[in-house]
Image (spheres, rainbow, N blue to C red):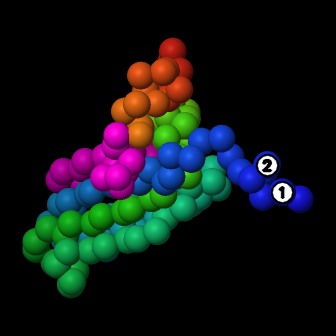
């Protein structure tokens, strides 16, 4: 079989989703376990790949905060759009975040790509190839 014929038409490369959570004092380890159970397991079942889980500082603070960083990989820009659209309308995702939020002092989420991809993605967006679905 010709490998070129089976290559996907979207060659944008991976898009990374980064969740950064700061725990309430003393909640770092519990937050990690809750995130793994409530967010990571269902996301992995939907085809996402968790490539890194990082903790700062490198000790669970009993009276201090921990910063947890989860780096996910999605195969391309269209997968990132689908993820955003599907999660926005999934009540189980909202319920999982509500349960976790009691342990969180601060949280951020970002979709990022390799710097070399920005120009290509911007050019493709001009042709509406990556335009978000109407409900996104």
Against 86, residue 116 (above or below) is below
| Residue occupying the far left of the picture | 63
| Residue closer to the observer: 84 or 132 | 132
Q: Is residue 132 visible?
A: no
- Mark 1 secondary-structure assignment: loop
| Residue closer to the observer: 104 or 84 | 84
Measured as percent of width and height from the top left, residue 44 is found at 59, 58
Q: Is residue 58 left or right of residue 3?
A: left
* Residue 95 magenta: yes
Marks 2/1: CA distance?
Answer: 5 Å
In terms of image quadrants, where is residue 71? bottom left
Q: Which mark is residue 5?
A: 2
Q: Residue at x 41, y 40 (%)?
A: 120
Asked whether the beta carbons under mark 2 and mark 1 sit within 8 Å of each other, the answer is: yes
Span colored in magenta? 93-119
State the residue position of label 1: 2
| Residue occupying the far top of the picture | 134
Measured as percent of width and height from the top left, residue 41 is found at 56, 60
| Residue occupying the far bottom of the picture | 59
Q: Is residue 54 left or right of residue 48?
A: left
- Mark 2 secondary-structure assignment: helix
Measured as percent of width and height from the top left, residue 87 is found at 50, 36
| Residue closer to the observer: 119 or 136 | 119
Q: Residue at x 49, y 41 (%)?
A: 77
Q: Is residue 5 visible?
A: yes
């Amino acid at each position: 079989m010709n490998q070129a014929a089976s290559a996907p038409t979207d060659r944008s490369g991976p898009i990374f989703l980064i969740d950064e959570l700061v725990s309430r004092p003393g909640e770092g380890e519990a937050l990690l376990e809750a995130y793994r159970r409530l967010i990571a397991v269902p996301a992995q079942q939907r085809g996402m790949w968790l490539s890194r889980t990082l903790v700062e500082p490198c000790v669970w603070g009993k009276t201090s905060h921990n910063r947890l960083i989860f780096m996910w990989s999605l195969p391309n820009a269209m997968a990132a759009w689908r993820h955003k659209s599907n999660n926005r309308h999934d009540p189980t995702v909202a319920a999982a975040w509500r349960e976790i939020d009691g342990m969180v002092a601060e949280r951020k989420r970002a979709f990022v790509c390799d710097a070399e991809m920005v120009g290509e993605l911007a050019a493709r967006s001009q042709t509406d190839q990556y335009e978000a679905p109407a409900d996104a």
